[in-house]
Image (cartoon, rainbow, N blue to C red):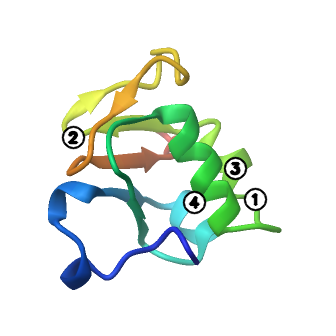
């Protein structure tokens, strides 16, 4: 997991925290990941990097149908290649829930 970082060795602003909920958590096998960055990266790059962290899982399929929050702001309808995720951000993947 080369993309994960020990926060004690890196300034907080150099990390994007990725959180997985429900089926995304189950697919990833973890609650979340920390991705080290040297500046803003696109949402598409975040997705590519988490896919590399969890090969041979169904995580990429699950997050493809997720609602996505950047901080508290829904961003799932924005262009993933254009949306910049700055260091220090929290990105959350929330799968659709049954009945809601």
User: Which numbered marker is on residue 60?
Assistant: 3
Q: Vertical placement of 78 versus 68: above or below?
A: above
Q: Disc 3 and disc 4: Cα gap in Å?
A: 11 Å
Task: Identify which residue, 17 or 96, lies in the foreground.
Answer: 17
Q: Are marks 4 and 1 in contact (CB under 8 Å)?
A: no
Residue with the mark numbered 1: 58
Q: Residue furthest right?
A: 56
Q: Vertical placement of 77 versus 80: above or below?
A: above
Q: Earlier in the sequence, mark 3 or mark 4?
A: 4
Task: Identify which residue, 23 or 77, lies in the foreground.
Answer: 77
Secondary element type, mark 3: helix
Q: Residues within 10 Å of mark 4 (few under 14, many from 20)?
A: some
Q: Earlier in the sequence, mark 4 or mark 1?
A: 4
Secondary element type, mark 2: loop
In the image, residue 9 lies at what x, y percent?
A: 24, 81
Q: Is residue 46 left or right of residue 56?
A: left
Q: Is residue 98 left or right of residue 52?
A: left
Q: Disc 2 and disc 1: Cα gap in Å?
A: 24 Å
Residue with the mark numbered 2: 71
Q: Residues within 10 Å of mark 1 (few under 14, many from 20)?
A: some
Secondary element type, mark 4: helix
Residue at image coords 49%, 40%: 99
In the image, residue 63 lies at what x, y percent?
A: 60, 45
Q: Disc 3 and disc 2: Cα gap in Å?
A: 21 Å
Q: Disc 1 and disc 3: Cα gap in Å?
A: 6 Å
Residue with the mark numbered 4: 23
Q: Disc 2 and disc 4: Cα gap in Å?
A: 20 Å
Q: Are marks 1 and 3 in contact (CB under 8 Å)?
A: yes
Instruction: Identify the image quadrant of the N terminus.
Output: bottom right
Mark 2 vs mark 1: in front: 2
Q: Earlier in the sequence, mark 3 or mark 2?
A: 3
């Amino acid at each position: 997991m080369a993309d994960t970082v020990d926060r004690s060795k890196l300034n907080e602003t150099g990390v994007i925290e990725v959180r997985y909920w429900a089926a995304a958590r189950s697919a990833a096998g973890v609650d979340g990941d920390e991705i080290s960055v040297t500046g803003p990266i696109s949402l598409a790059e975040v997705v590519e990097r988490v896919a590399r962290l969890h090969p041979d899982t169904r995580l990429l399929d699950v997050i493809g149908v997720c609602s996505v929050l950047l901080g508290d702001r829904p961003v799932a309808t924005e262009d993933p290649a254009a949306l910049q995720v700055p260091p220090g951000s929290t990105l959350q993947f929330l799968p659709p829930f049954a009945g809601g």
